[in-house]
Image (cartoon, helix red, strand yellow):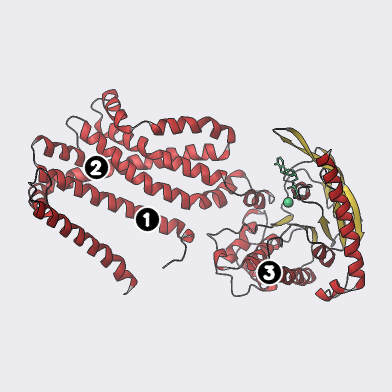
Amino acid sequence: MNPTFRKFFVPFVAIVIFLALWEGLVWVMGWPNYKMASPSDLIPAYQRYWDLFLIMGWQTLWRTVVGLIVAIIVGTAIGMIMGFSRTMRDALYPLLVGFNAIPKATVVPIVALMFVGAHDFNTILIAFMISFFPIAVSVSIGLSTLEPEYRDILRSLGASQTTIFWKIALPKTLPEFFGALKVAVTLAFIGTNLMEIVSPHGRGLGALFDSGKTNSDYPLMFAVLIALAALGIVLYYVVVWLERTFAGWAERESH
Amino acid sequence: MSPLIDIKGVKHAYSTADGPLPVLDGLDVTVEEGGFCAVVGPSGCGKSTLTRLVAGLMMPDEGEVWLHGEQVKGPRSTVGMAFQNPVLLEWRTILQNVLLPLEIVPNALKGKAAEDRARFLLSLVGLEGFEDKRPSELSGGMRQRASLCRALVHQPDVLILDEPFGALDAFTREDLWQTMHDVKAKEPFTAILITHDLRESIFLGDQVVVLSGRPARTQYVMNIPRSDKPTLDDLYTSEAADRLAILRQQIEIAQGRTEAEVEG
Ligand SMILES: Nc1ncnc2c1ncn2[C@@H]1O[C@H](COP(=O)(O)OP(=O)(O)O)[C@@H](O)[C@H]1O
Ligand SMILES: [Mg+2]
């Protein structure tokens, strides 16, 4: 089979089989749609609310992406501080781990109250808080595990710390960074939706989900879940594409 | 004429959690221009520390390091380094890796001239045709050859080699010894080579310095007449056997001191 064809065909078939199994399961078990909607129930939901899906989907998407960008900037900065200074690493690590251990679902209502009405801001804040940790850790590990010889090669020529960072430390950390970014994308997405669902008069797909719940529109709720999955897949593959472009050299040739 | 590398009474201690760890204790090494100084000594005695001092990556607690009649006070772009780990940058091609020092050293060759020089060096070590390959596509020996080109590309006064062949199999290593001689014939340099292979030290060095166990001092210096056309057969002569015997004895003495300290 031709590789490009296989790359698109195989996942496509997998999705079709998954949908067929889902449809079949609901049909065989005779589940009513408040227990479990089937794929065929979702089509009317999309037809009825397609404009809402577009608007809400966009809101979810842009806030997730902005939260993620903030997470990348702050996470990379913290990672650099911890990667270059042992003292800062010892100082910040327990704080970060502790912060990360707090379930974000408990932080959401606090943030929602703290900045009442600032819905976009709240959502971005949660998306950021939930997703910067893996980035900070990966960057700090990437920088601190740089073999001393790499540094020495450049330092012996009189290179500055900045040159060493741009020429060696940064590119060498990219594979780990992208690994973390894949995790962070999913997390940021969870963060956005947590806030959207919890906030009163929220926006985004989370709010659409919530309105499905209030109106007992079960197919709508399932339709939102599928839309979220689709957005998640898109974002994830955007990161994969960025990784190929900027850190493709780290890919092992494997078939 | 003053020697190119002059290490005078160098003492150095690292500060560790258990207090200061004296590593070098009265080290004297002199290398003339164009000389090749091989340094052997028990493992952990301070050989890599010596290379870091010569490269100006650290300053000794006491004593002085002079290069080319100037006291070393910091890194200088007139040295080239190669280590046991070839530390090539995976995201660059072999050619781009070799060009790296030229991007940093001031007033270095640029553009086409730089590339020509890198290609010339690569062909000198037998890597012609591998310029556009990634390091991961090369064998260990080939990577070490590329690392050698990178160390030489900016025409350094001093080549500092810290066990560059230590991780290679015996045949590859002997190939590289020959390559070192070939390169030196076309691209003269002054070198300090750290090694734990006595045959390597007498085949490449015109001077072999034996360091004592930690803290290291210069224990023994052997001068070796330079041969016009060195070949591996030189290692199987009776002179070579005698030299190796002396060096082995010196190493045993050096190790003895380490053991005595451990027991005491
Ligand atoms: N930065 C450092 N801090 C503390 N101790 C060090 C440091 N670098 C090396 N050492 C110690 O100093 C000794 C000599 O190290 P090194 O010069 O690398 O030895 P060699 O290259 O001869 O094996 C070793 O015992 C090593 O553990
Ligand atoms: Mg060493």
Numbered disc 1: secondary structure:
helix
Please say if B141 is above or below B103.
below
Q: Quadrant of the N terminus of chain A?
A: bottom left
Chain where mark 1 sits: A
The kind of residue tagged 1 is Val
- Residue sitting at x 43%, y 30%: A98
- Residue B7 visible here: no
Cα–Cα gap, marks 3 and 2? 56 Å
Where is residue A96, by image quadrant? top left
Q: Residues within 10 Å of mark 1 (few under 14, many from 20)?
A: some
- Residue count near mark 3 (Cα–Cα under 10 Å), binned few <14, some 14–19, many ≥20: many
| Parent chain of label 2 | A
Mark 2, residue position = A60
Given contact means CB atoms under 8 Å apart, are the residues at marks 3 and 1 in contact? no
SS for callout 2: helix
State the residue position of label 3. Answer: B121
Amino acid found under the numbered disc labelled 2: Thr
